[in-house]
Image (cartoon, rainbow, N blue to C red):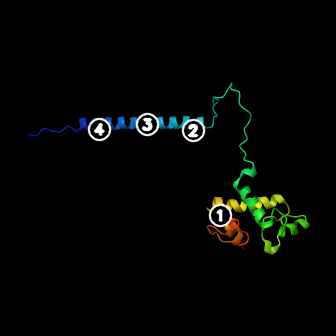
């Protein structure tokens, strides 16, 4: 006669394993919830930061602003002013000056365009040169060629300062 297998005891063991696994999973989920709750609650609260320089006398404020005379666009602006109008003494600059306006950089000379103020002229050139060099990836020489001819050659008479050969 064969012995009868008792499944009841093995089923109880698996039931205990399932209960233990469920309990551990519950602890894990609760731990994650509590940890994330305390983390997100602390985000909104500013915490006091320690200043390592407390009690140390600071030197005078140092300006981080670069004077425009030391910037690349200003140097190129002065170069273009010289090449286009000899710093405002000839060409379209003289015509605009008679009207109380500005155009020392040869901007739209065919149309006889004049800027209302010198500041408008500076900002127009600064924006143009920034767009072409910083964002357009041109070299200074190529940007000057584009300014004079409309084409971004690597070099040209205008960028080399050969005004007699420039267009």
Whether 147 is drawn above or below 28: the answer is below
Task: Using the image, determine if residue 94 lies above or below residue 4.
Answer: below
Q: Toward the viewer: 158 or 112?
A: 158
Disc 4 + disc 2, Cβ < 8 Å: no
Closer to the chain start, of discs 3 and 1, is: 3
Marks 4 and 1 close (CB-CB < 8 Å): no
Q: Which residue is mark 4?
A: 14
First in residue order: circle 4 vs circle 3: 4
Tag 2 or tag 3, which sits nearer the N-term?
A: 3
In the displayed structure, would residue 109 be above or below residue 81?
below
Q: What whole-number distance in Å separates the C-alpha atoms at marks 4 and 3?
A: 21 Å
Residue under label 3? 28
Q: Secondary structure at mark 3?
A: helix
Disc assigned to residue 141:
1
Dot 1: element? helix
Q: Position of residue 92 (x, y in %)?
A: 83, 69
Where is residue 28 drawn, in percent x and y?
Answer: 43, 36
Q: Earlier in the sequence, mark 2 or mark 1?
A: 2
Q: Position of residue 87 (x, y in %)?
A: 81, 62
């Amino acid at each position: 006669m064969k012995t009868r297998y008792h499944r009841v005891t093995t089923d109880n063991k698996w039931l205990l394993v399932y209960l233990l696994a469920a309990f551990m999973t519950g602890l894990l989920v609760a731990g994650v919830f509590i940890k994330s709750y305390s983390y997100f609650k602390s985000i909104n609260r500013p915490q006091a930061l320690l200043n390592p320089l407390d009690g140390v006398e600071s030197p005078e404020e140092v300006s981080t602003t670069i004077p425009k005379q030391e910037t690349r666009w200003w140097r190129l602006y002065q170069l273009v002013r010289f090449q286009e109008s000899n710093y405002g003494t000839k060409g379209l600059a003289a015509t605009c000056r008679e009207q109380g306006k500005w155009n020392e950089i040869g901007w739209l000379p065919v149309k006889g365009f004049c800027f209302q103020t010198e500041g408008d002229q500076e900002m127009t050139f600064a924006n143009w040169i920034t767009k072409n060099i910083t964002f357009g990836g041109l070299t200074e020489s190529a940007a000057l060629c584009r300014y004079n001819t409309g084409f971004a050659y690597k070099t040209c008479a205008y960028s080399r300062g050969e005004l007699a050969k420039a267009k």
